[in-house]
Amino acid sequence: MSVQRVGCEPDAVVVRRATVQTDRDVNGRYRWSLKAPNGRIVAVSAPVYETAVRAFQGFDRLCSGSADLVVRITHVRGGIGWTWAVPGPDGVPSVCSHRAYERYATCQNAFRRVLVLLNQPELIQRSGNGG
């Protein structure tokens, strides 16, 4: 979690920032994950990328088109809970929730919070290779 002080006074406001990081899968490819200011992972890339730089580029494309994102919320197959995913142009998800949510409304709100983060990419710190 990244913390930044705003102002020079001792009682300055503390601003916590979200973080996007890349991680290498066991197959050698990269994925990105978005962490909220509280440190919880709130979104992950569905596709894999050949390099960390390409993973960050995929995240940047997602941020630049965040105003037009449409979410698909589905019930977990054979389980309890709801997940969200954003279909890409070919119908394959481009980003999805990191976990299942117990209630449909909670899942909706989780996606709304991700949209708020994506609409403010200047407040998202990068971590990992290629950042």
Image (spheres, rainbow, N blue to C red):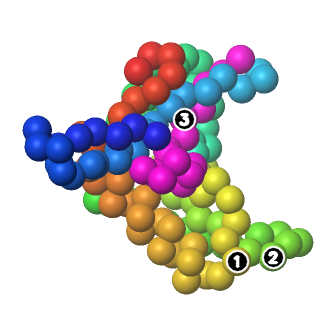
Q: Name the residue beneath numbered marker 2.
A: 80
Amino acid at dot 1? Glu
**Outermost residue toward the right?**
78
* Local SS, label 3: strand
Alpha carbons under labels 2 and 3: distance apart: 26 Å
Position in image of residue 85 (x %, y %): 57, 60
Q: Specify whether 128 is left or right of 5.
A: right
Question: Rounded to the nearest whole Å, what is the CA distance between mark 3 and mark 1?
Answer: 24 Å
Q: Is 100 included in the stretch rendered in magenta?
A: no
Residue 17: image tag: none
Q: Secondary structure at mark 2?
A: loop
The mark closer to the camera, 3 or 1, is 1
Q: Are marks 1 and 2 in contact (CB under 8 Å)?
A: yes
Q: Residue furthest left?
A: 8
Q: Kindly identify the residue that appears in the image at 18 percent across and 51 percent down.
A: 11
**Mark 1–mark 2 distance (CA, rounded to whole Å):** 7 Å
User: In the rendered image, which residue does mark 1 sit on?
Assistant: 102
**Of the pair 64 and 9, the residue shown nearer to us:** 9
N-terminal label among 2 and 3: 3
- Please name the residue that numbered disc 3 is placed on: 32
Q: Name which of mark 3 and mark 1 comes first in the sequence.
A: 3
Q: Mark 1 or mark 2: which comes first in sequence? A: 2
Residue at screen point 56% across, 78% down: 106
Q: Which residues are magenta?
A: 28-42
| Observer-nearest of 113 and 83 | 113
Magenta span has 38?
yes
Q: Position of residue 25 (x, y in %)?
A: 72, 26
Where 97 sits versus 7, above or below? below
Q: What kind of residue is marked 3?
A: Trp
Residue 115, position as x, y percentages in the image: 38, 60
Element class at badge 1: loop
Which residue type carries mark 2? Ile
